[in-house]
Image (cartoon, coloured by chain):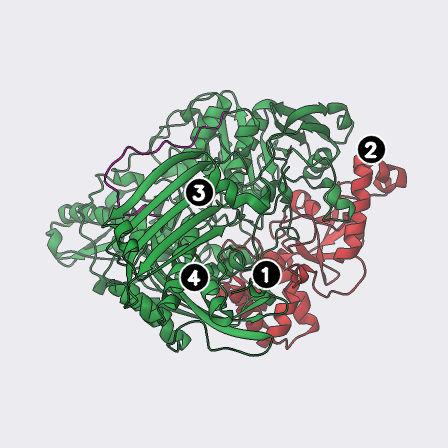
């Protein structure tokens, strides 16, 4: 049995921000970083002068970070969001999942430059306690968390998935979330919550 | 349920005796990075009292002028829901509304030192001697005050929602205290409520932290921000060559453990020019880079040119268990020695012996550990996900050359820990770095820092020998267990401390010869009744990988061995595994969980293995049970599985668990724990083993240390919770995980007739066992 089979990213559409594409981008940035600074590369590319604007949860932000910086750090440290989390930095666990133009992506391996002129949605942008998204309501109803560190990624993945597969079966939900890890063992509650939202 | 703003901002309003130093920077957890606050730093001094007197009511409870009941607890929320259950206990015994209770947890000098939050002890402790008793004591005190105020005898007073009524009059707790501290002391003899009166205890109340976690408002320690804070990353002995396991360039930035290596040389010029770079911190072999921004610190850690000298090699993993068995014994403990074991075995009709082994396993928290520390003007403040704020305070004080009172540790919840993950290590690292840069420093480990430098769960070797008489009864039981430890609970002997040059203490010496205690609380002593029984454990000197408590430490390993061996004995006696267990116990609650699980699973009584099956896929079922730690919960698990004999892959198809931990404070919280124990237990039993070669750990990420995922979980999970409202609360955080491995191994034997005695049951091991003769 291939023990890593379920570690593969879920079947998201190919293109910008998928795990495969993003790894390449970060690998390139990393190599440059070691060789003399991703900053230098960005400078040569003229990206710094141009500035970088991203839209997060409907609000525009001018990014201060080097364009090669993973989107994760911009969301957390510049914009101050706590609904996006660092887990592995290698697109293996899903904790950092946000949506880019509605698609679930791994923000830990997605350079912020890839989000330019695109719309980023984080957990905070989905709903609020006063006006919760059906998935959020289901997660609260099912008490679908222990430590809760993985939960933002789970919800963002599930939200993108249910939009394309509204009447998902339990088996489909399991597959959709198979690229997301939870160590507390909250899986059954997460599945119940997503299933409840799918039926809602 | 109403959601609350974080409680802590008001905590110093009511905590008495905070000494001369009120640190204006004391609440950075709640600072918004978008509005960098201009907090000022206070003059040097020390933080308040060294300890908080546990006998004073005011150390546990306060009633604010706003009527809010503030609970101060030394046991912290690790993501298991214990704070919610603790609030229920207080609401019940103090007769106040659950929604009017706020909790302050884990601050040195402010909350009582209740020891580590660990070992399934939180609710048990709060029930037996902590918050429940403090609340009952406070209620008595308040009733007595009300009796005086109202002129009505206390015996004629009743309380509801914090309002005392009697003789046609009423007064609230709030009014009785007027914002002053609760007077008086905790009485361990305080009268507690009869279970028949419970209205809050036993209810599945929803957790208050969950909405914040679902709406992205929860502040983990990873989110702590302090004005002027800079970012650091540790740089640890790395393998000289990229890992073969990874083909991508990312592999080149992964640092696996290089065991025992020491710093050879470091070239600061390799990072000095990087944007935002601030400082290279070196203290013996402890190395960290500091930068203004987090991504800059990561880039500097990757770019730093550093060389390490090889240390002593690790054992060959293929021979780990022989290495443990033959290592120098640090201490020997005779835990149980009753009857005449040698005589009983000599006279037995049949003697069985078997060796069980358990590997190093990782806590494998999803969020790598993080901490913030600010060392300045002779004081240190630390924001940490530690399980023991007071113990960490001592370690930080030692490492920084400060007195404990010059250090304040504030607990802030992190990613789930399941024992000593990198929480204390990251905290110590942040303190060491902050001392050298004089600024608030945030350290977050990278994935490889966390998972390859953990204090892993300990590997164990367990030899068991037992004799059966002609009727199939066990007449003698002999256990010898070897545990390999290095380091552990927060002290300097966690990786950052050892790398920084603090000496590692030798293993504790053997205790003086004395009558055996009968039980070490580690499940070494079986929970079945044998007339002749000997239990001996050996702590061996193992200067290899760091170890420390991992959910059900040693208990899981011992339970696996005991319950597997009970199954071997049952098979040798030709008995049904459940009937055999029941025949060897007079413990009614153990029998109850076994029977309840059997009924939930639809157990069909017959000996194992199952009648011969044809085809490549075989099915089986197995049971394991435990009286946890000899004095805690009773659990039984029955697992059904199928095994593909061609691939060796196990698919668990059903799990049934019956659980009895006395009074159930919050049934949904308990169920959440049992579910989590099942999932983590399946993962550890089927997949998890820290792989290493002679120079260091090979498991550095989720592909090289895989854990279970959604697609591998059985759909059919049946959980039976047995409630005893009239009995004390026991632990539930780790009892269930201890029986999962045994139940799987026994089911595998049932399916195939082959016994696997080494965890985890990977397809390779299963295939090898199936191919073996006999």
Label the green chain with its letter: B
Q: CA distance from mark 1 to mark 4?
A: 32 Å
Count all numbered tags in the image, as a single digit.
Answer: 4
Residue at mark 1 to residue at mark 3: CA–CA distance: 26 Å
| Element on which disc 1 rests | helix
**Do the residues at discs 4 and 2 belong to one chain?**
no
> Residues at marks 1 and 2, common chain?
no
Task: Please identify, in this view, whether the residue under mark 3 or under mark 4 is nearer the observer.
Answer: 3
Indicate which label's residue lies in the foreground, 1 or 4: 1
Which residue position holds label 3?
A: B483
Magenta span: B503-521
Residue appearing at x 76%, y 58% in the figure = A18
Left or right placement of residue A178 versus residue B428 in this view: right
Q: To which chain does the residue with label 2 belong? A: A
Circle 1 crowding by C-alpha within 10 Å: few under 14, some 14–19, many from 20: few
Numbered badge on residue A36 = 2
Q: CA distance from mark 4 to mark 2?
A: 51 Å
Q: Which chain is red?
A: A
> Residue B160 in the image: x percent, y percent?
25, 58
Q: Where does label 4 land, which residue?
A: B674
Q: Are marks 3 and 2 in contact (CB under 8 Å)?
A: no
| Crowding at mark 2 (Cα within 10 Å: few <14, some 14-19, many 20+) | some
CA distance for labels 3 and 2: 47 Å
- Residue B226 visible at all: yes
Would you say B702 lies left or right of B184 here?
right
The chain letter for the residue carrying disc 4 is B
Badge 3 element: strand
- Residue count near mark 4 (Cα–Cα under 10 Å), binned few <14, some 14–19, many ≥20: many
Q: Position of residue A12 (x, y in %)?
A: 74, 64
Residue identified by numbered label 1? B768
């Amino acid at each position: 049995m291939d023990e890593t089979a379920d570690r593969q990213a879920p079947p998201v559409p190919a293109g910008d921000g998928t795990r495969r594409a993003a790894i390449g981008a970060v690998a390139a940035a990393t190599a440059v970083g070691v060789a003399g600074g991703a900053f230098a590369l960005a400078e040569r590319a003229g990206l710094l002068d141009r500035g970088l604007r991203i839209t997060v949860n409907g609000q525009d932000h001018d990014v201060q970070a080097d364009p090669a910086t993973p989107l994760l750090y911009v969301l957390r440290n510049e914009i101050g969001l706590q609904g996006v989390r660092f887990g592995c930095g290698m697109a293996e666990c899903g904790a950092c999942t946000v949506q880019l133009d509605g698609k679930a992506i791994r923000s830990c391996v997605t350079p912020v430059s890839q989000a330019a002129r695109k719309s980023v949605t984080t957990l905070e942008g989905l709903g609020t306690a006063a006006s919760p998204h059906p998935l959020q309501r289901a997660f609260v109803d099912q008490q679908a968390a222990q430590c809760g560190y993985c939960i933002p990624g789970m919800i963002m993945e599930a939200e993108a998935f249910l939009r394309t597969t509204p009447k998902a079966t339990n088996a489909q939900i399991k597959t959709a979330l198979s690229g997301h890890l939870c160590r507390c063992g909250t899986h059954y509650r997460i599945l119940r919550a997503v299933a409840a939202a799918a039926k809602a | 349920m109403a959601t609350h703003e974080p409680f802590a901002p008001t905590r110093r309003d009511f905590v008495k005796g905070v000494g001369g130093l009120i640190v204006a920077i004391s609440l950075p957890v709640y600072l918004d990075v978008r509005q960098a606050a201009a907090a000022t730093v206070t003059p040097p001094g020390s933080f308040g009292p060294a300890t908080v007197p546990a006998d004073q009511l005011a150390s546990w409870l306060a009633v604010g002028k706003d009527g809010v009941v503030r609970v101060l607890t030394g046991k912290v929320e690790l993501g298991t829901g214990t704070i919610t259950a603790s609030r229920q206990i207080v609401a019940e015994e103090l007769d106040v509304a659950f929604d009017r209770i706020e909790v302050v947890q884990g601050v040195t000098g402010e909350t009582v030192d209740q020891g580590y939050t660990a070992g399934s002890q939180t609710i048990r402790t709060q029930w037996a001697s902590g918050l429940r008793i403090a609340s009952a004591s406070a209620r008595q005190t308040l009733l007595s005050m009300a009796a005086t105020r109202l002129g009505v005898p206390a015996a004629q007073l009743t309380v509801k929602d914090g309002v005392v009524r009697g003789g046609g009059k009423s007064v609230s707790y709030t009014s009785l205290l007027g914002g002053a501290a609760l007077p008086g002391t905790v009485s361990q003899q305080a009268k507690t409520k009869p279970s028949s009166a419970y209205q809050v205890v036993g209810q599945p109340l929803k957790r208050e932290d969950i909405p914040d976690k679902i709406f992205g408002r929860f502040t983990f320690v990873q989110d702590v921000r302090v004005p002027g804070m800079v970012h650091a990353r540790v740089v640890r002995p790395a393998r000289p060559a990229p890992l073969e396991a990874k083909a991508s360039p990312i592999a080149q930035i992964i640092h696996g453990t290089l065991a025992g290596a020491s710093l050879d040389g470091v070239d600061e010029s390799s990072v000095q020019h990087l944007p935002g770079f601030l400082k290279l911190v070196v203290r013996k072999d402890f190395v960290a880079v500091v930068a203004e921004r987090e991504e800059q610190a990561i880039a500097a850690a990757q770019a730093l040119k550093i060389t390490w000298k090889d240390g002593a090699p690790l054992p060959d993993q293929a021979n780990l268990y022989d290495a443990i068995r033959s290592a120098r014994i640090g201490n020997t403990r005779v835990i149980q020695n009753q009857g005449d074991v040698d005589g009983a075995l000599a006279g037995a009709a049949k003697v069985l012996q078997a060796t069980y082994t358990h590997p190093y396993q990782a806590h494998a928290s999803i969020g790598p550990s993080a901490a913030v520390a600010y060392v300045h003007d002779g004081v240190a403040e630390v924001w940490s996900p530690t399980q023991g704020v007071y113990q960490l305070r001592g370690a930080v004080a030692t490492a920084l050359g400060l007195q404990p009172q010059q250090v304040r540790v504030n607990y802030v919840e992190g990613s789930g820990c399941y024992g000593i993950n990198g929480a204390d290590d990251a905290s110590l690292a942040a303190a060491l770095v902050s001392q050298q840069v004089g600024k608030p420093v945030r350290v977050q480990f990278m994935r490889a820092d966390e998972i390859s430098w953990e204090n892993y769960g300990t590997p164990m070797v367990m030899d068991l020998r037992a004799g059966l008489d002609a009727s199939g009864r066990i007449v003698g039981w002999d256990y010898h267990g070897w545990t390999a430890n290095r380091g552990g609970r927060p002290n300097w002997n966690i990786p950052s401390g050892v790398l920084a040059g603090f000496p590692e203490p030798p293993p504790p010496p053997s205790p003086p010869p004395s009558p055996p205690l009968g039980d070490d609380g580690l499940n070494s002593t079986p929970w079945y009744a044998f007339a002749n029984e000997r239990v001996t454990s050996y702590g061996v000197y193992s200067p290899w990988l760091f170890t420390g408590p991992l959910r059900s430490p040693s208990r899981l390993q011992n339970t696996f061995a005991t319950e597997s061996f009970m199954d071997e004995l049952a098979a040798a006696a030709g008995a049904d595994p459940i009937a055999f267990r029941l025949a060897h116990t007079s413990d009614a609650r153990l029998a109850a969980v076994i029977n309840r699980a059997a009924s939930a699973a639809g157990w069909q009584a017959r000996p194992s293995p199952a009648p011969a099956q044809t085809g490549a896929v075989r099915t089986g079922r197995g049971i394991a049970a435990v009286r946890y730690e000899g004095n805690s919960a009773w659990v039984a698990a029955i697992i059904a599985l199928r095994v593909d004999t061609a691939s060796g892959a196990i698919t668990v198809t059903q799990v049934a668990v019956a659980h009895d931990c006395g009074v159930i404070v919050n049934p949904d919280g308990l169920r959440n724990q049992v579910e989590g124990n099942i999932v983590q237990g399946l993962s550890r039993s089927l997949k998890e083993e820290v792989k290493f070669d002679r120079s260091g750990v090979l498991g550095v990420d989720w592909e090289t240390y895989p854990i279970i995922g959604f697609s591998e979980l059985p759909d059919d999970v049946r959980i039976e919770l047995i409630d005893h409202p009239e009995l004390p609360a026991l632990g539930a955080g780790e009892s269930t995980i201890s029986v999962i491995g045994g139940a799987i191994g026994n089911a595998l034997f049932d399916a195939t007739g082959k016994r696997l005695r080494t965890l985890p049951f990977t397809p390779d091991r299963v295939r090898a066992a199936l191919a073996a003769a006999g």
